[in-house]
Amino acid sequence: MPIASVYIHVPFCRTRCHYCDFVTRATSDPIPDTYVDGLLREINRKRGHLARIVTVFFGGGTPSLLAPAQLEQVLNRLAQQPGICPDAEITLEANPDDITETLARSWRELGINRISIGVQSLDNRVLRYLGRRHDADRARRA
Ligand code: SF4
């Protein structure tokens, strides 16, 4: 059976880093459900072209700003036919500032089995220069 990899872009961040070249918008608001509704509609439209999914990658932007319930909606929709392989790699990009133990547990319960943490540097001067929200200590704790 053909296999597929799915990339889902989450174009929202808390602040805009100075070097950023990605499609994203800075906002202090929660990620709107209307965006997630749009994702679900797009998955439905593409369903006829989807094969069995072996990797899912939530990139951004800052996917760790998605509420667990929003992530669950997207993953549930992807899990419908032809579905996600049981051993699929499911990755979420996360900013160190967002990671808490509770959130990490939720991600694991949702089947997310790989986290890509945007550390960028463990030198606070570099982090300030880049306009990152976190410092080195926060990155280590994350
Ligand atoms: S967190 Fe990433 S996507 Fe967001 S503004 Fe910074 S570099 Fe860009």
Image (cartoon, rainbow, N blue to C red):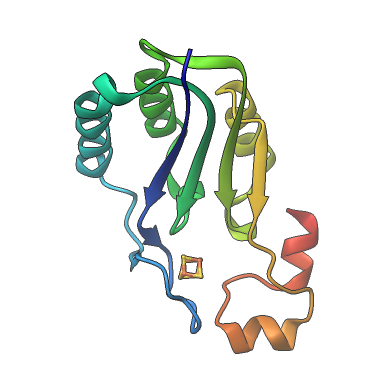
Q: In this view, does 96 lie to the left or right of 2?
A: right
In the image: residue 37, left or right of residue 141: left
Vertical placement of residue 118 versus 108, above or below: below
The residue located at (43%, 14%) in the rendering is 83
Q: In this view, does 111 lie above or below 119?
A: above
Q: Which of 22 and 107 is in front in this view?
A: 22
Residue at 46% from the left image edge and 19% from the top image edge: 2
Q: In which quarter of the image is residue 81?
A: top left
In this image, 13 relative to 139: left or right? Answer: left
- In this view, the residue in front, 86 or 73, is 86
Q: Which residue is drawn at 74% across and 82% down?
A: 124
Q: Quadrant of residue 82?
A: top left
* Residue 90 image offset from top left, x and y in percent: 58, 32
81, 95: nearer the viewer: 81
Position above or below: 82 against 50? above
Q: How many labels does the image show?
A: 0
Q: Position of residue 11 (x, y in %)?
A: 35, 57
- Residue at image coords 32%, 57%: 29
Which percent across, then down, holds residue 115? 65, 43
Residue found farthest to the front: 1
Q: Residue 62 location in percent, x, y?
A: 47, 56
